[in-house]
Amino acid sequence: MINFSHLAEKYQTPLYVYDFDAIAQQYETLKEAFRARKAIMAFAIKSNSNLSVVQHLAKLGAGADCVSIGEVRRALLAGVPKYKIIFSGVGKQDHEIKEALESDILFINLESEAEFERVEMIAKELGLQARISIRVNPNIDPKTHPYISTGLHGNKFGVEINAAKRMYLKAKKSEHLDPVGIHFHIGSQLTELEPIREATEIVADLVRTLQAVDINLKFFDVGGGLGVTYENEVTIDPKEYAQAILATMRGLDMTIICEPGRFITANAGYFLTRVMYEKQNDEKRFVIVDGAMNDLIRPSLYSAYHKIEAVDNESEKSPADIVGPVCESGDFFAKERLMPRLKHNDLIVVYSAGAYGFGMGSNYNTRGRAAEVALEEGKDRVIRRRESFDDLVALEKEFLL
Ligand SMILES: *Cc1c(COP(=O)(O)O)cnc(C)c1O
């Protein structure tokens, strides 16, 4: 059991806490599921980009999936070897492409024909050959929330099969491109295996077609998206996930790349916040806490469910909205949630806050971002200090007249 009261006392609230042992366990579970093959687990940095989290995973052997050059820099800074770093994303700027090529990372994932041209041109200017992969959009409905679905033609991600084929043929002829991989990522918080199996089959078929014209790719990148349990979702078993992919890839001698984000960190993270006030408007009960949507926006943005508990409080429960102090009606963590009677300074734990939590945070309402703390083998330590007012105005102060 994690001693939340002790941590809140020691580091103050609002506070993010990450259980590094749980992160390691998730990583090892997935890695183990793919044991039969050469495989790289490339942690999706955007899900939790704290340097110490990335370093922890790098030490276990993880790679990194990055969606900006900033994330590539983070991965390198945290000790991820360059040959395990990949760079994805629909809109890479020229300077990002240039730096990625100069950094000599494993490959760049191309998401359009226009981007193909840019990368080729920049590689030519630098006088080198860019290792590339193409993100294929297999047009599969991942059956998840529309905001986190990415594998349908109606989404902005990837290119359709025929365009991908054309691009590979062009890349093979290019002096400045080296097609080494193929990529797909159909969505996030996937809880059904079938869409993944279908997507894998489509992409594996394309790999075979390419082999027939002597384009031999080395990396088969299946993206991320493995779902986790926030409330009572039944999720995909990692072993079955790996088996489905491995079975579909029979006969293909390729290294598998997985890009798990949420699966690794979501349930290893906790957000601690203290009650400021209780308030009753007619029939409606509000619990006002010191954390807010600027700390954890998932409930506001995706109507996401997070389990919430009051620490050491067995009093009778009644429904309440748990809200932050930000001046937006969308600033809530839960609505009509059964909560015990609460008073000033009572501690509340928001579960499953390790992915897309801190990283999606902002300074809205001039609120400094929370501190982040790691728990490892029974010890706790700060991995990001709380932002101060001085931090918040540092980039503006010098421009005052
Ligand atoms: C966001 C993203 C991931 C990680 O998704 P999770 O649902 O957190 O596993 C992996 N790959 C790409 C390309 C992504 O954009």
Image: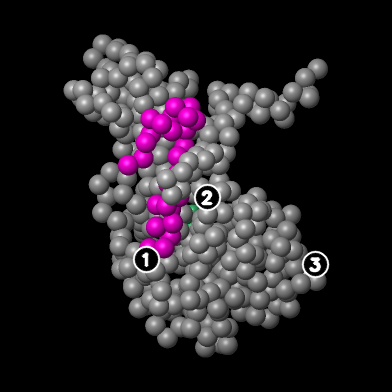
**What span is in magenta?**
1-29
Nearer to the camera, 338 or 349 = 349
State the predominant SS element of the stretch in magenta.
Answer: helix
Q: Is residue 151 visible?
A: no
Expressed as whole percent of the image width and height from the top left, the position of residue 204 reads 44, 77
Q: Which residue bears the numbered disc 3?
A: 126
Foreground of the two, 168 or 19: 19
Comes first in the chain, label 2 or label 1: 2
Residue 390 vertical position relative to residue 278 in the rendered view, above or below: below
Disc number placed over residue 53 in the picture, else none: 2
Residue at left offset 71%, top offset 28%? 394
Q: Is residue 81 left or right of residue 311?
A: right
Q: Which residue is mark 1?
A: 196
Q: Is residue 42 left or right of residue 390?
A: left
Disc 3 residue: CB within 8 Å of ligand 1: no
Residue 81 lies, in percent from the top left, at 62, 64
> Is 177 rendered above or below residue 184?
below
